[in-house]
Image: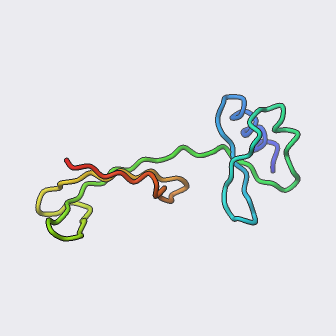
Amino acid sequence: MTGLKLWEVLKALDEGKKVQYYDTVGEEWCEPLVYSVENFSISIKGGTVYRVKPEVEVKEFLGYVKKDEMFLCIGEQEPVDTHKITIEFEDGEPICESIKMEKI
């Protein structure tokens, strides 16, 4: 990890932002238990990659549900859109627990 990257992570911690480290066994980004600048510098392991946790991106989609069928069509469709679907994304992947649908 370069000095510049380490500085960015420590600065983010000082600003109250969350950081993550990459778990090579689980092949995923994880949040460390340590969240203070003072303790974080002690917990840095050689070869471990850290980053500032990215902001969650929220996307909204419009679609319609065909009555009496299990059918949802997203995008500009006929008839008029009847529902709004909201999904949160992290690292370009949808967070399944975040999916919300409401009638419009």
Residue at the outermost top position: 15
Give the number of callouts.
Answer: 0
Residue situated furthest front in the rendering: 68
Q: What percent of the width, then of the height, locates residue 38? A: 83, 31
Q: Which residue is drawn at the image coordinates 69% and 47% (left, top)? A: 31
Query: Would residue 45 be found to the left or right of residue 92 on screen?
Result: right
Is the residue 78 above or below the residue 97 in the image? Answer: below
Residue 55 in the image: above or below residue 77: above
Q: How is the image coloured?
A: rainbow
**Residue at 72 percent of width and 38 percent of height:** 8
Q: Residue at x 77, y 32 (%)?
A: 36
The residue lying toward the viewer, choosing from 29 and 52, is: 29
Task: Give left or right: position of 74 versus 38.
Answer: left
Q: Residue 73 appears in which quarter of the rendering?
A: bottom left
The image position of residue 56, as x and y in percent, is: 51, 46
Where does residue 59 sit, x and y in percent of width and height?
Answer: 38, 50
Residue 102 spot, x, y in % from top left: 26, 49
Q: Residue at x 23, y 69 (%)?
A: 71
State which quadrant residue 66 falls in.
bottom left
Horizontally, residue 60 falls left or right of residue 81, namely: right
